[in-house]
Every structure is written in structure tokens, then in C-alpha cells.
Amino acid sequence: MSAPDAQGASDKYCAYCSDSDGNLKSREEAVSGLAAFLDARQKVGVAESRKRAKRYLTAMPARAHKADE
């Protein structure tokens, strides 16, 4: 990880995508967390934030296979 605060419990996933044991969070947990962050910053509403979060997460290698959902 390039940012020390983004380092998770595992070398495989960042702190935002992994749980305290270093395992990948569920897709719903990741979408919900990122959507909340986006809405707090961009003030676009829950539905739009979730849409943006899903789109963003498909760019992550661990989530790319879910691009069609």
C-alpha cells in the first residue's frame, strides 16, 4: 500500500476492503461503506452514491468479476 493508513490486516487487501482479520469484506459491506463515504463528500444522495460505489468497486481487481451487477 502506498498510504500507510490504508494498510489492512492483510497484504492482499486495503483496510477499507478488508475486515479486521484481513479477509475481503462482502460486496454489500464494501458498497455500503463506500456509498456512505461518497455521499458525505459529494452530497448526491443514497441512490446515486450506491450507483457510483458499485461502478468504482468494479475497477478493483477483487471485485472486477461483479461488473455486470
Image (cartoon, rainbow, N blue to C red):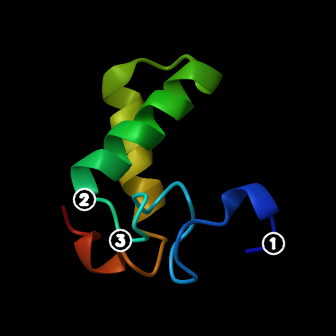
Evaluate if marks 1 and 3 touch, with contact meaning CB atoms under 8 Å apart: no
Residue type for callout 3: Asn
Point 58% across, 82% down: residue: 11
Point 54% across, 32% down: residue: 37
According to the image, label 2 marks what residue? Answer: 26
* Label 2 CA crowd tier, 10 Å (few <14, some 14–19, many 20+): few
Q: Quadrant of the C terminus?
A: bottom left
Q: Is residue 30 above or below residue 59?
A: above
Element type at mark 3 = loop
Work out whether residue 28 or residue 4 is closer to the camera in this orientation and state it: 4
| Circle nearer the N terminus (1, 3) | 1
Task: Please give the label number shown on residue 2.
Answer: 1
According to the image, label 3 marks what residue? Answer: 23
- Residue 20, image x, y percentages: 43, 58
Which quarter of the figure has residue 47?
Answer: top left
Q: Is residue 10 shown left or right of residue 5? A: left
Q: Is residue 34 above or below residue 56?
A: above
Q: How many marks are shown on the rendered structure?
A: 3
Q: Is residue 44 above or below residue 55?
A: above
Q: CA distance from mark 2 to mark 1?
A: 24 Å
Work out whether residue 26 or residue 34 is closer to the camera in this orientation and state it: 26
Point 24% across, 59% down: residue: 26
- Residue 24, image x, y percentages: 35, 69
Residue type for callout 2: Ser
Point 51% across, 83% down: residue: 12
Evaluate if marks 2 and 1 touch, with contact meaning CB atoms under 8 Å apart: no
